[in-house]
Image: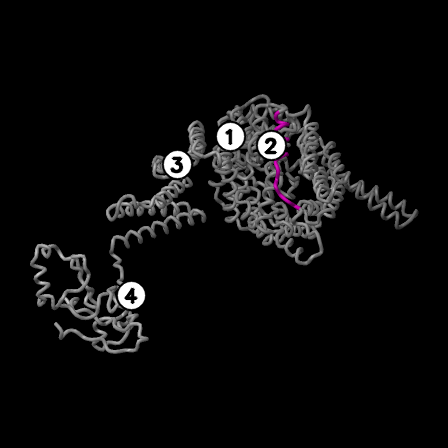
Amino acid sequence: MMQNVHLAPETDEDDLYSGYNDYNPICDIEELENDAAFQQAVRTSYGRRPPITAKIPSTAVTRPIATGYGSKTSLASSVGRPMTGAIQDGVTRPMTAVRAAGFTKAALRGSAFDPLGQSRGPAPPLEVKKKDSPEEKIKQLEKEVNELVEESCIANSCGDLKLALEKAKDAGRKERVLVRQREQATTPENINLDLTYSVLFNLASQYSVNEMYAEALNTYQVIVKNKMFSNAGILKTNMGNIYLKQRNYSKAIKFYRMALDQVPSVNKQMRIKIMQNIGVTFIQAGQYSDAINSYEHIMSMAPNLKAGYNLTVCYFAVGDQEKMKKAFQKLIAVPLEIDEDKYISPSDDPHTNLVTEAIKNDHLRQMERERKAMAEKYIMTSAKLIAPVIETSFAAGYDWCVEVVKASQYVELANDLEINKAVTYLRQRDYNQAVEILKMLEKKDSRVKSAAATNLSALYYMGKDFAQASSYADIAVNSDRYNPAALTNKGNTVFANGDYEKAAEFYKEALRNDSSCTEALYNVGLTYEKMNRLDEALDCFLKLHAILRNSAEVLYQIANIYELMENLSEAIEWLMQVVSVVPTNPQVLAKLGELYDREGDKSQAFQYYYESYRYFPCNIEVVEWLGAYYIDTQFWEKAIQYFERASLIQPTQVKWQLMVASCFRRSGNYQKALGTYKDTHRKFPENVECLRFLVRLCTDLGLKDAQEYARKLKRLEKVKEIREQVSHMGLQLLSANFQNRIKSGRDGSGGSRGKREGSASSDSGQNCSASSKGERLSAKLRTLPGTNEPYESSSNKEIDASYVDPLGPQIERPKTAAKKKIDEDDFADEELGDDLLPE
């Protein structure tokens, strides 16, 4: 054993670690088999117990072993370094750690001192996790579900509702796969409930916006019934909204109240919103008393503008005048919570001014403006609603509302109420009262003055008093140069005077101030049309069509311009769009029939003319066209009903009754034709054509009345000839007198005799001319050939008269005049946009 004992080298006394490498050989377990004392101890009964020493690492310095006899000294045969804490030579050795700091047996064999283990090199790289592990698959799938939910929300915000629903469904499917994988890999308690809730909630929301209400309700039920989701009961509000859209008011109120029970009392804002929903549901269901209870509670707890307005409407519905006044006062008293003073710079400090300018148009300021505009809208609407019923007259009601508004924070709305009062007088056609109120408002500030002058200008323009209209338009423009309605009215007055260039400038200025002023853009197009600048007019109306997609007036003007440009196919296409907007307008249908007729498509023309006649059977041009169409197709019986309608529309026009009689005669019904001619003769006894037909028919039928009608015809023809002669002679006399006066003015008094001679000679010449013309007319009547007669001439030689069939063998179809604009009754704002009164 001693051969393994190594003595520590002598070192300096200052070496703190001296002797630490010295160890007792008894700690060397390799030599325990040769230690007799140790082997003897193992053989004893105590030695049969399991050893209490642990396995000692090979790099550590061994430690003395306790024998269990109460002494921790080494064995008798052991020599070497004393144990730690032992007393040697009267000196106690200090306690140290089990291992020395960096000292091992290898240090004695020449290894370098390396306490930090730098000689071992860098640490090995971390092990790469396998991608196909269950944990990695779950994390990746969870990430995909989150991305799908986000994409669904983004698509919804962009308006692509279909794509949003598809993404929500994909997220739901993948989330279910994720739950199954997580249950297989770990315990069910580790399921991500927040992710499940977000997926289901998003899916229900997308179902709702896509109007798939049954699916949305089922999905909401899944969330609400799951007790693991905290605060899911608030979603019953969404379910109530769906039932409200389905007009199932009882269930909507039920779910709203259930949601109200789920909301804690500390969340007052949410409770107020749910109660507002309950009030709206009661209003739509017609239960105004219940709605009043809800809104009264809201106004007592947390008053707001919407609740105050709805409360006023409910009291108006039940007809309680006093409660209407109180509700209106509560609405006025709702605080706006807007500080206007912070937007006014109090000093000349440049820094403060810059800050004020920066916040004048920021997002907060825009929100405040929207809130103020909403409050003004509610107050104005409520005042207009209750003013006619809260007092004995609407004027007294408006006065009460004006007084209440003047005493509130909305003082500037009083003038607007006065303007509404004037507009109400206009609707009641009490123009004097309206003008009086508007003239009184001229003395107010510039904004009110401009609005009043604009209305006065429109009033005088509609009354065709263009001078007054122009004067008040100037006042309106001078008061507010940026008022588009005032500029438009000024352009209207200039347009009425024919100065189209200047009118176009006013309309353009109105558009520069307000690009959404559709009246100005419409009038610019009409002005260009008047100036025959059709391309520019077409551009204006196409721009207006992009703003007003379903405006029949704009569509018709585009069709009209294409017609003026001789592009009939485009005109027909745009008129078809007009018909899709106003399918029962007879003027548009007649215009379509006219265009098809001009293109030669008579079947289509007949279809639209017939539709126009169906909706308005009093348009004489349409009736005439349809009658002529049936004559061309030789359907005489069909033509008769249209000419009879024309005779009712224009009873003083003989031609319609003659056409009816002619249709009877051409269809072979001579008795009906004779009766119609006789009725026409009784109404129009001086009509030559009717007498000619009577003579001819009576002669062919062998009636005795033929001679009488022949005598009347001759007498009427003679009277007609005499009248023509007299009228012709009168014209010649007037011409001669005019020439003689000119001559007498040139020749002086000496020319009077020549004048008289010239007059006598001219008179004699006129008599000769008239007599010769009368003879020629008589001869013409006697020798008029019968080529246009529908049947053979009569053999009775005593009748010295002839006639011409008003229809003739081939009737030329009457052409309707091309209307430039639709009838004013249909499109009142067609020319100059008179409807300029502000709401």
- Looking at marks 1 and 2 on the same chain, the residue that comes earlier in the sequence is marked by 1
- The quarter of the picture where residue 109 lies is bottom left
Callout 3 secondary element: helix
State the separation of the CA atoms marked 3 and 1. 22 Å
State the separation of the CA atoms marked 2 and 3. 66 Å
Q: What amino acid type should be assigned to the residue bearing mark 4?
A: Pro
- Residue 195 rendering spot, x and y as whole percentages: 35, 46
Label ID, residue 279: 1
State the separation of the CA atoms marked 2 and 4. 146 Å
Determine whether, in the image, residue 509 is placed left or right of residue 260: right
- The quarter of the picture where residue 108 lies is bottom left
* Viewer-nearest of discs 1 and 4: 4
Residue marked by disc 2: 655
Residue lying farthest to the right in this orientation: 749
Q: Do callouts 2 and 4 mark residues in contact (Cβ within 8 Å)?
A: no
Q: Nearer the viewer, residue 105 or 393?
A: 105
Q: What amino acid type should be assigned to the residue bearing mark 2?
A: Lys
- Looking at marks 4 and 3 on the same chain, the residue that comes earlier in the sequence is marked by 4
Residue marked by disc 3: 213
- Say if 377 sits above or below 503 in the image: above
State the separation of the CA atoms marked 1 and 4. 88 Å
Neighbour tally class for label 3: few under 14, some 14-19, many 20 plus, Cα within 10 Å: many
Residue marked by disc 4: 94
- Residue 619 rendering spot, x and y as whole percentages: 57, 34
- Say if 300 sits above or below 810 in the image: above
